[in-house]
Amino acid sequence: MDAGWPQTIDGRWIRWTAPQGESASVHFDSFAANARPDTPLPTWTIWGGNHIDRPDWTLRFSTHAPAELLQDLTFELALGQGVQQVPARTLPRPARLAEQAPPYVPPPPCRPDSPRSR
């Protein structure tokens, strides 16, 4: 990656980790990439959060993932767009009504006017 993300190779894994202060990483699994085409193993793993063992979010892709999709995702991460923290929203509380609504009064029971004929 040309975004200043350090690359490490550890056995079957090639990892690109975001610079300090960012919490995202891209992993390539060379074993999965060379496995049978129908393997369920993810070839690419993109994650964000404090640690890979407990990420806030994870995206996993097979060898069939379009290169353009991977390129767009990693581009967004490299620019810092994918790791921005969204501030927690607080829902506005509904305003209290000045007056209490009148209690519910059920309608009177229906009484037939005439006996039913069968």
Image (tube, rainbow, N blue to C red):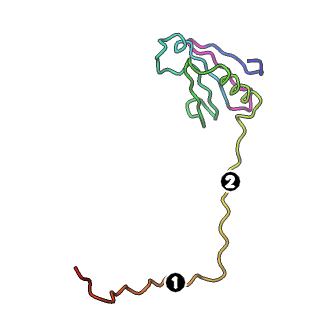
Disc 2 residue type (three-letter): Arg
110, above or below 36, in the image: below
The magenta-colored residue range is: 10-23
Crowd band around label 1 with a 10 angstrom C-alpha radius: few (<14), some (14–19), many (20+): few
Label ID, residue 89: 2
The residue that appears at 49% across and 14% down in the rendered structure is 37
Q: Earlier in the sequence, mark 2 or mark 1?
A: 2
Q: Quadrant of the C terminus?
A: bottom left
Asked which secondary structure carries label 2, the reply is loop
Number of marks in the rendered image:
2
Residue 101, quarter of the rendered image: bottom right
4 on left or right of 60: right
Residue 58 position in % (x across, y down): 58, 32
Q: Is residue 115 left or right of residue 58?
A: left
User: How would you rate the neighbour count of disc 2 (Cα within 10 Å): few for under 14, some for 14-19, many for 20 or more?
Assistant: few
Q: Amino acid at mark 1?
A: Pro
Rendered location of residue 78, percent (x, y):
74, 27
- Is 13 inside the magenta-drawn segment? yes
Is 62 situated above or below 80? Answer: above
For numbered disc 1, what is the local secondary structure? Answer: loop
User: Who's the residue at 77% across and 29% down the image?
Assistant: 79
Disc sitting over residue 103 in the figure: 1
**Residue at 60% of width from left, 35% of height from top?**
57
